[in-house]
Image: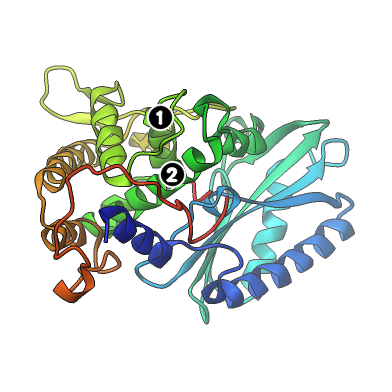
Amino acid sequence: MSIQTHFNIFDKNIYLTSQSTAYKKAREKDESILQEIKNAFKDADYPIIDSFMQGSFSVNTAINSIEGDFDIDRAIVIESDTAPEDPLIPKKLILDILTKRNFENPKVKKPCVTADYLSTNLHIDYIVYKRVGENYSLAVGKLNSAIAHKEWSASDPKGLSDWINTSVNYGESQIKKKKQYKRLVRYIKRWRDVNFTEEVRKKIFSIGLTVMVKEQYKPNYFDSVISDDLSVLKTVIVNILASNYFKKQFQSEDYRVYVNLPKKPYRDIFQHKIAGGESENGSDLNVGNQLRNKLIQLQNKLQNILDEVDEIKQCTILNGIFGSDFQIPSKSDSSNGGKVAAGATVFPSAGASGTSQGA
């Protein structure tokens, strides 16, 4: 086998879509709750005019959770003319519904309403927007937020999905290149899940990784040949580390990671909390240091794999990087006696596990 074949199998093992069999029960819960939310909003005289998936499902970069749970980001959209002035009112309606629906400790967070279902491994974030024309505003605020911290904030959720999905800058073989980009995002998300503690990985946001990979994935515009995922992943990691995402703090050897949303509200994705509950740009130091150090380790390991000519040894290192879903072949599985040319160019069916975010 080629090393790309093993990456394709790995991608198939981790790739999750809203139509996946494993997701069926979660999808049914989502649809049931959405209908109840629609009814409640209609009774409150601000009917829902649109609802759509956000996050990884919306751009086909979702992966199976190691813990076996499912995350859903569901946008709820109402007309600007009918929206209440207080953005907390519709969020409280959703909170009431989730409280009655056997969710564990549902809460209103600054950008969303969130909860975990008790009887199903399901975590849902409901994000409320008001819309006028094509312009969206996000309901921002917590239950006890002062007036100064409650607002309808300009946002562009569909623009963000479009930005992630666009392939117009890829030139030749745009579809193949876009599929490769999506695979790279899924790989790096699984790498995060395997290599960081829960406390740290929950602060390494999927959308942050998605944006970094998008900005640093730079295929040759005029080349229709798609290089193997291994060598391209190595190049992307090198580009990420060479960028200005990681910044050393003044008079310190510590780093924070900074990544801005490419669409409204253009905020820093890795903002961390400071005294008083406010947010400050950049990650906390623990996240910044760990993410940078582990990316350096990943870069070195990927180079070791490229230098290795034994297919089984390559896959063994990749298994250590990505976990058990990257399978190690037996000698009998290797039709070429376990040898593969390092960095060999292949023509993958790229994305054979699915078409078109897990951001």
- The percent coordinates of residue 118 (x first, y second) are 51, 78
Secondary structure at numbered mark 1: loop
Lateral position of residue 265 relative to residue 77, left or right: left
How far is disc 2 from disc 1 in space, using C-alphas?
Answer: 10 Å
Image quarter for residue 237? top left
Q: Which residue lies furthest to the bottom in this view?
A: 119
Q: Nearer the viewer, residue 219 or 301?
A: 219
Say whether marks 2 and 1 touch (CB < 8 Å). Answer: yes
User: Vertical placement of 313 versus 216: above or below?
Assistant: below
Position of 69 compared to 40: left or right? left
Q: Which of 28 and 331 is in front in this view?
A: 331
Mark sitting on residue 249: none
Q: In this figure, which residue is indicated by the disc labeled 2?
A: 180
SS state under label 2: helix
- Categorize mark 2 by other alpha carbons within 10 Å: few (<14), some (14-19), many (20+): many
Q: Can residue 130 be seen in this view?
A: yes
Does 329 sit left or right of 60 as displayed? left
- Quarter holding residue 94: bottom right
Q: Quadrant of the N terminus?
A: bottom left
- Label whose residue precedes the other's in the sequence (2 or 1): 2
Query: In the figure, 232 relative to 248: above or below?
Result: below
Q: Amino acid type of disc 1? A: Pro
Q: Residue at x 76, y 46 (%)?
A: 77
For this rendering, which residue is in front, 5 or 318? 5
Relative to 15, is 25 above or below?
below
